[in-house]
Image: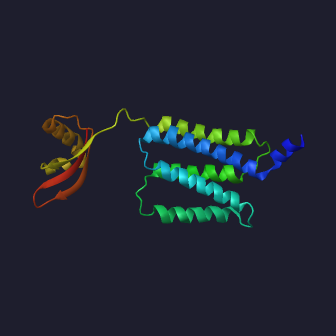
């Protein structure tokens, strides 16, 4: 009986349990919600590593006289320095902030009930993101192939004629073009380089 009590009071086991919960929640968010809905796996490593490191730093900060606001401020400064040159969309930044939030909550929050509290909070976070993904974003039906095309009809590059542009490229290439993006325009030659997706 005494050994069980000592095991429950051991801060190492409490930290490992919190870390396990954090990893499970991060895996659900990153691998089962973020990746299937965005089809982007290049950010998974960064999300995992950031979540793990922030969790560890927060655990260590519990034994240091520092306010939580200062700790979050340090993370914010680090994030700005790290991602200032990276072209992250608002959606990726939202997931990035969620990873930080989950790590901080699981590392530093104290709950009245040590079992129900973390389960409820993490469930609310996961359910909220899952529901928002289903409401605001549709899962891509299929992955698109891309190619670079040298295009000569400059008059179709206006936003108002985007539909005509897609139809013209589809007719010329005999492929169903879903999207076209301008890479660069050469006004002297009267041509443009396009990224086309089919």
Indicate the position of residue 129 as horizontal and vertical percent values.
Answer: 55, 40
Indicate the position of residue 161 as horizontal and vertical percent values.
Answer: 21, 44
Residue furthest top as drawn: 141
Residue 189 sits in quarter:
bottom left
- For the C terminus, the image quarter is top left
Residue in front for this viewpoint, 2 or 19: 2
Q: 197 left or right of 86? A: left
- Residue in view at x 70 percent, y 48 percent: 16
- Residue in view at x 46 percent, y 52 percent: 90
- For the N terminus, the image quarter is top right
Residue 123 sits in quarter:
top right
Residue in front for this viewpoint, 169 or 31: 31
User: Image height check: is 16 above or below 1?
Assistant: below
Q: 120 left or right of 191? A: right
- Residue in view at x 86 percent, y 44 percent: 3
Residue furthest left as drawn: 189
Q: 152 left or right of 17? A: left
- Residue in view at x 16 percent, y 39 percent: 168
Residue furthest right as drawn: 2
User: Image height check: is 108 above or below 65?
Assistant: above
Identify the coloring: rainbow
Residue in front for this viewpoint, 7 or 68: 7
Indicate the position of residue 181 as horizontal and vertical percent values.
Answer: 26, 49
Residue in front for this viewpoint, 102 or 27: 27
Indicate the position of residue 13 as horizontal and vertical percent values.
Answer: 75, 48
Residue furthest front as drawn: 3
Q: How many numbered marks does the figure carry? A: 0
């Amino acid at each position: 009986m005494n050994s069980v009590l000592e095991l429950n009071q051991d801060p190492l086991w409490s930290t490992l349990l919190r870390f396990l919960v954090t990893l499970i929640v991060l895996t659900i968010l990153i691998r089962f919600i973020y990746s299937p809905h965005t089809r982007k796996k290049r950010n998974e490593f960064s999300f995992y590593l950031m979540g793990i490191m922030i969790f560890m730093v927060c655990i260590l900060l519990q034994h240091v006289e520092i306010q939580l606001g200062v700790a979050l401020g340090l993370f914010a400064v680090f994030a700005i320095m790290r991602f200032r040159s990276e072209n992250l969309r608002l959606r990726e930044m939202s997931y990035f902030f969620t990873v930080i939030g989950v790590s901080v909550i699981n590392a530093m929050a104290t709950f009245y009930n040590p079992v129900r509290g973390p389960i409820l909070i993490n469930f609310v976070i996961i359910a909220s993101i899952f529901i928002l993904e289903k409401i605001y974003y549709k899962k891509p039906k299929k992955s698109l192939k891309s190619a670079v095309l040298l295009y000569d009809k400059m008059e179709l590059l206006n936003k108002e004629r985007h539909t005509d542009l897609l139809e013209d490229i589809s007719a010329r290439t005999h492929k169903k073009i879903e999207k076209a993006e301008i890479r660069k325009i050469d006004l002297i030659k009267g041509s443009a380089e396009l990224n086309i997706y089919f």
